[in-house]
Amino acid sequence: QVQLRESGGGPAQTGGSLKLSCELSGYYYGHYCLAWFRQAPGKEREGVAIFFTSTESTFYADSLKGRFTISLDRATDSLDLRMNSLAPEDTAMYYCAANVANSGDTCRASLIDKEKMTWWGKGTLVTVSA
């Protein structure tokens, strides 16, 4: 049973940066996709970035590539999302998620299909003001 708890959300200004963290537990053995999703008000939940634990491969939503960076700190069991050059359209609830995976292709597919994710955190809110 994987448990996820997000932190680091809050207010930010346009052009600013923010780092979100997801405290992980229960994933120590096996191969996983570890991901960040977000849901803006009135919109569908969408994939932001995903990390495959076996190869440390990362995949990003095309629209966010270059601004956001996902990483896994194995020393602290934290999945981090560094967000730069923030814009008001980045305002959303950000969720950490995980599923079991046997390949990077599974993670790539999971990024665009949230139904493939098995475990979810409760989310952390990011609000970017103009």
Image (cartoon, rainbow, N blue to C red):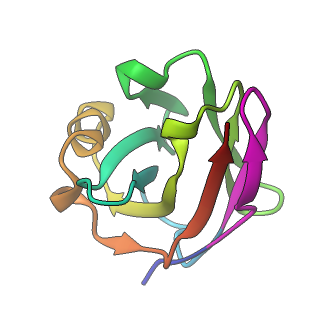
Residue 104: % across, % down? 33, 33
Task: Say if 53 sits above or below 1 in the image.
Answer: above
The residue positioned 28% from the left and 70% from the top of the image is 118
Q: Is residue 111 visible?
A: yes
In the image, is residue 18 part of the stretch drawn in magenta? Answer: yes
Residue farthest to the front, as pictured: 130
Residue 25: image quadrant is: bottom right
Q: Is 107 left, or right, of 18 in this rendering? A: left
Give the left or right position of residue 102, taking residue 6 as reference. left
For the stretch drawn in magenta, the main secondary structure is: strand
Q: Indicate yes or no whether the magenta region holds residue 13.
A: yes
Magenta stretch bounds: 6-22
Of residues 94 and 79, the one drawn nearer to the viewer in this rendering: 94
* Residue 35 image position (x, y, % from top left): 45, 50
| Quadrant placement of the C terminus | top right
Compared across the picture, whether 47 is left or right of 2 comes to: left
At 70% from the left and 24% from the top, the residue drawn is 85
In the image, 101 versus 49, the foreground residue is 49
At 37% from the left and 19% from the top, the residue drawn is 62
Camera sees residue 33: no
